[in-house]
Amino acid sequence: MCAAAALALAGCWGGPADDGEDDAADGASFEAAPWPMFHGRPDLAGAAPGRLPRKLTLRWRFQADGAIKSAAAIDPAPLDASGRDARVFVGSSDCHVYALALADGRKLWAYKTAGGVEAAPLVLEGAVYVGSNDGVLYALDAATGTLRWEYETGGQIPGGANWARSPQGDRTWILVGSYDMLLHCLDAGTGQVVWTHETGNYINGTPAVGGGRIVFGGCDALVHILSAADGSPVATVGTDAYVAGSAALADGRIFVANYQGRFFCIDLETQRILWHYGDDESPFYSSPAVGPRQVVIGCGDNKVHCIDRGSGRSLWTFATRGNVDSSPAICGNRVVVGSGDGRLYVLRLSDGRQAWSYEVGQPVTASPAVSGGWVVVGGEDGAVYAFGPEP
């Protein structure tokens, strides 16, 4: 049975107030922006505009009947500090997709699938597109949760969907990978196949879209680069080990990590590897977030790593007590990330110092969604947690 409770509890504060480098904010004014998909936008850069409040407060907790490994999506309605008019969409291993009110966590609707939902929802043009471990991509009405169409792939869908425009600009395409080894491109309105691209193994993550390209990795140890116009292959880049997470795109660069502990920066146009970081074989399940001059990623060595974008040099690491499979999000001078030690952390992007943390008690492998001063994340305890400004 699922329930939501409105709470007014603060998380455990992680130390004294920061110095002048800190750009966290007090007060009730925060920049409103959507977070409608995994890592916020099609390039999967994982960066939200604006700032987080100096002190986050647990505003509500929603309990599902199964672990929440899915990243949440926040409906791109106008947001303010009250959270009015905004909705949260999230999947659970209890075989449901939930729509919740951001303001108080009320369940607005739930849609039952035939398999657990680990993939992040995509909210676009009044619909929610979400894959399930039953191998089906569901298109649901965002307002009511009714089924618009469904599309069956040949394997489970662990990664979130992305989207692109047709070359003529008159159609929206939905892009999703599957364990059937195919990347599927579907018409958003009808669910009809536009094209598919075959790879050599499972596809785990969300495909990134930017610069006229679609970029994704998989268990074939390759980074695939396709034309966004028609899905035709442009190139592949070998990484020597399978890619469990998603790539991020920024300024003509691909940032992607593999299971053997290597993180790569690849030129999108030439496909040349510009640098790589790490070689201790601790696996990267996390996907990178891209800041102004750095990239941040979690690792199986229990650490959050911050790397210089230009050189691949380590800028800082932050040690937790569990694997960091959660994909971080950046907001101003803040990094938000979960850990297998059961805590949600907020770190300073500038130096990796802990600014705040909250103890969930069970591993946090889901990736946080950040919008308008709110942070929404799920835990393996089956709960969705929403943190925001003090009411």
Image (cartoon, rainbow, N blue to C red):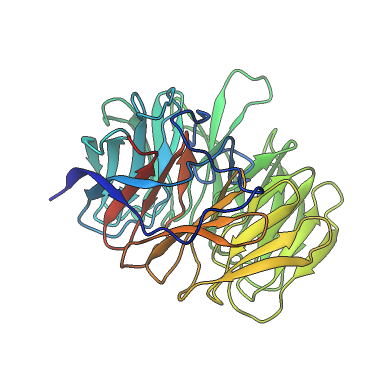
Q: Is residue 113 visible?
A: no
Tell me what residue is drawn at x 57 percent, y 38 percent: 41
- In which image quadrant can residue 24 be found? top right
Q: Is residue 231 visible?
A: yes
Tell me what residue is drawn at x 23 percent, y 45 percent: 7
Vertical relation: 89 (above or below) 172 = below
- Using the image as rendered, state which of residue 324 and residue 349 is in the foreground: 349
- Left or right: where does residue 151 sit relative to residue 180? left
- Left or right: where does residue 221 sit relative to residue 177? right
x and y, in percent, of residue 206 in the image: 55, 49
Tell me what residue is drawn at x 39 percent, y 41 percent: 388
- In which image quadrant can residue 313 be found? bottom right
x and y, in percent, of residue 135 in the image: 38, 52
Tell me what residue is drawn at x 57 percent, y 53 percent: 18
- Left or right: where does residue 370 sit relative to residue 113? right
x and y, in percent, of residue 60 in the image: 27, 44
- Using the image as rendered, state which of residue 328 and residue 226 is in the foreground: 328
Vertical relation: 212 (above or below) 218 = above
x and y, in percent, of residue 181 in the image: 54, 58
- Using the image as rendered, state which of residue 362 and residue 319 is in the foreground: 319
Q: Residue furthest left?
A: 1
For the C terminus, the quadrant is top left
